Amino acid sequence: MAGILGLCAFTATAQTVETPREAAGSREAIVLDIEGAIGPATVEYLRRSLAEATRREAGLVILRMDTPGGLDSAMREIIRDIIASPIAIATYVSPSGARAASAGTYILYASHIAAMAPGTNLGAATPVQLGGGRQPLDRDKDDAGQDKQPSAPADAMTAKAVNDAVAFIRGLAELRGRNADWAEEAVRQAASLPARQALARSVVDIVANDLSDLLAQADGRTVRIGSTEHRLDTAGLRPVVIEPDWRTRLLATITHPSIAYVLLLIGIYGIVFEFLSPGAIVPGVIGAICLLIAAFALNLLPVNYAGVGLILLGVALMTAEAFLPSFGILGIGGIIAFVLGSLLVFDRDVPGFALSWPIVMAAATVSAGTLIIAATAAVRAHRRRVATGDTGLIGMTGEVLAWSDGHGQVHVQGERWAARADVVLAPRQRVRVVARERLTLVVEPAAETAPENRGR
């Protein structure tokens, strides 16, 4: 009997320990911070974090967002992950002063719960053409001669992009039961809304002061996850922030346009210097590593490959200037091609993915400086006296080692040579080379010295 009672007590104790642990896992609200431009690193961060939230059986995932927008491809991957998520996701535009512009608006519309903090805004979701600048829209003039709101795309390609974006965001609005007409305005007319007006027009579900307020207002709401309706139980959830891991931070660093651009230049110049100085090894190794990393980063970014081609052409022309007598034409053309390529390589209208002028000018200045140094070194090398071959030997001085009957041995440039002369010479006498006949040097007494008896 005592054994049975002990077994029952053990079982009861095990049950009371296990249940709170399960409950603790389900009583978490995973918070993910999306700050800055949305790109490949954001996709990686959200994908890993959503998998972790699923493993923990979190009660809710909160995307705390402040973004100017980002890449269309990255945005669509994030939206696919949100729609496929087995856990409800709330996108919360926060803190006050934050925004969910462009791609952020689409992500907000795709989320199960859309929330904003007071003093935030969303909208301006007109698409941009990667590599080609912002989409032009027709603008009519009003009676005062001012531009009206854009109404229709100016060309067929732009119309296709805008209509595709409209259909996409309207589909998200219908999926989540939000204002589809305003979503279309955000795309076609780049409309924006502050938090209170967004709530009044059913664009968002909640305006919350902080995370606790958001969890309290979300409690009891019904959302659709997959094909099933779920009632949220968010009261008392404990917010847990998941920070990006080192891989995500590394990806965010190398996919920043400025970093990718600098890595590309280091790679190019490293390879060039290795070819100019074979056997140096270090420039070649560093250049190869940087070039491969830059190629990986550029593959994930909106790149105009005509810009990359102009950069390569510019470097090639500046390098050729050091070896060809073009009187600066190749160098100037190379600098122009380099600057133009740098300005074209990334689309300046994609939020957060533009290459700044200061970086371009700094890179051009460094490249031009390298060109000047290389050209100066080449000119000096051209003017320098030849140090090898027959030409290098002529005029060199040495010392007689042994001499007899017009022939003997001399020491020139650290080497022992057979020599002949038309005059009588003596050992230890300084001589000058006047010619070479195969392996025999023709010498004469050095002008600055006469036959001398050193050491006597």
Image (cartoon, rainbow, N blue to C red):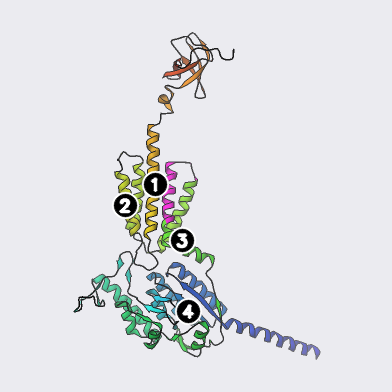
Mark toward the viewer: 3 or 4 = 3
Identify whether 437 is placed above or below 168.
Answer: above
The residue under label 4 is which amino acid type? Ser
Quarter of the image where the N terminus is located: bottom right
Q: Which residue is mark 4?
A: 85
Q: Is residue 231 visible?
A: no
Mark toward the viewer: 2 or 4 = 2
Q: Which residue is mark 1?
A: 369
Local secondary structure at mark 3: helix
Reading the chain from its start, which is encountered first: label 2 or label 3? 3
Bounds of the magenta segment: 262-281
User: Rounded to the nearest whole Å, what is the CA distance between mark 3 and mark 4?
Assistant: 28 Å
The quadrant in which residue 361 appears is: bottom left
Crowd around label 3: few <14 · some 14–19 · many ≥20 (10 Å): many
**Residue 21 in the image, given as x and y percentages of width and height:** 63, 82
Tag on residue 254? 3
Crowd around label 4: few <14 · some 14–19 · many ≥20 (10 Å): some
Disc 2 + disc 3, Cβ < 8 Å: no
State whether the magenta stretch is mostly helix, strand or loop: helix
**Residue 167 in the image, given as x and y percentages of width and height:** 32, 79
The residue under label 2 is which amino acid type? Ala
Local secondary structure at mark 2: helix
User: Rounded to the nearest whole Å, what is the CA distance between mark 1 and mark 4?
Assistant: 53 Å
